[in-house]
Amino acid sequence: MPKSESAPIVYRALVFVIRLIAPLLTRRRWRAQHHIPAHGGALVVANHISNYDTLTLGDYLVASGRWPRFLGKADIWKVPGLGWLATQCRQIPVYRHTERAKDSLVHARAALEAGDLVAIYPEGTITRDPEGWPMLARHGAARLALATGVPVIPVGQIGADQVLGGRYLEFRKLFSPRRRDVVVEAGPPVDLSDIGITEDPTPEQLADATARMMGAVTDLYAELRGEAVPELGWDPWQTEYAAR
C-alpha cells in the first residue's frame, strides 16, 4: 500500500480485504503504472465496463502509490453500509438531475487542488454499447481538467465484466471455478496544453478536450482487446451510434 500518502484507516482496511478476496476471483495484470503521478493532483479517466471495475481500478491505483477519490452515483450513499464506507473513504457523490448536480465537480476540483488523485468515468455510467466499447462521454471530466490544469491520465481496463457482469449484475459469475484475467493499463498524460487552463471553456473546447480524453482511453481499451477502434461510438442520449 502507498506509504507516501495518508488514508483513512477504513480505506486501508477495505483495500486489505479486497486484496485477500480478489486473487480468488481474478488474475490481475497491472500495466504501465509509471504513468500514474507519484504525488500532486491528478485526474484519472477510465472506461467503465462493470460494477466490479471500480474495485479493480482502485486496487491498481493504490498499487501505483495513490489513494484515489472516485466520483460515484449518489445512490451508492443510500445503500446501508456501502454509503458509510464511501464516506469514510472520502469518495465524492454525484447528484444527477438535482439542485446539487454541480456539487460533485466543486468537491472534485477542491480535491485536485489539494493534491489528491481523483478518478472519474467520463461516460457517467457503465457502457451501454452493445459490443462493450466506451461510449460518447459527458463533459464533467473536461471541465475539471481545464479548470485545474492537473495531469489527465487515461486508463483502459478489461475483464471486470467477466467477474460480476456488465451493465446488469450477474452474481452467478462470482462462483465460477475459473479465475478471470483482469487487465488495467495507464497511458501517458492527455495533452490539453493548447487549450490551456480556463474557468469558462467554450462548448467547442469542452468537446475537444472530452474527445481527446476518451480517444486515449478507447485506444488503450482497443489495445487490450486486440482490435481496431470502431469509427462510430455509442451515443447514450440518442441510443444509436454516432461519430466519435
Image (tube, rainbow, N blue to C red):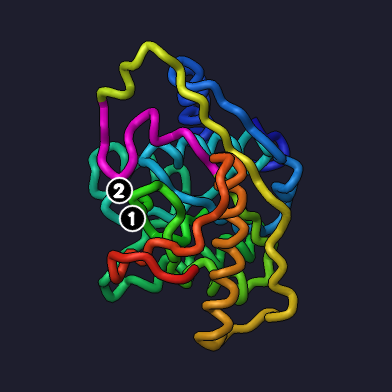
Residue name at image x 45 percent, y 41 percent: 54
Q: Is residue 97 left or right of residue 55?
A: left
Q: Position of residue 202 (x, y in %)?
A: 54, 88
Q: Which mark is residue 194?
A: none
Q: Is the Cβ of the residue at disc 2 closer than 8 Å to that at disc 1?
A: yes
Q: Secondary structure at mark 1?
A: strand
Q: Nearer the viewer, residue 102 or 126?
A: 126
* Residue 200 in the image, given as x and y percentages of width and height: 55, 87
Toward the top, the furthest residue is 177
Viewer-proximal residue, 90 or 189?
A: 189
Percent position of residue 64, x then y: 68, 38
Q: Quadrant of residue 52?
A: top left
Q: Is residue 187 above or below residue 151?
A: above
Q: Nearer the viewer, residue 228 or 205?
A: 228
Q: Residue at x 30, y 69 (%)?
A: 237
Does residue 68 appear anywhere in the picture? yes
Q: Amino acid at mark 2?
A: Ile
Q: Residue at x 67, y 59 (%)?
A: 41
Looking at the image, residue 149 lies above or below residue 183? below
Q: Nearer the viewer, residue 117 or 48?
A: 48
Residue 76's disc number: 2
Residue 162 magenta: yes
Q: Secondary structure at mark 2?
A: helix
Q: Residues within 10 Å of mark 1 (few under 14, many from 20)?
A: some
Range of residues picked out in magenta: 157-171
User: Which residue in the structure is indicated by mark 1?
Assistant: 73
Q: Position of residue 149 (x, y in %)?
A: 68, 71
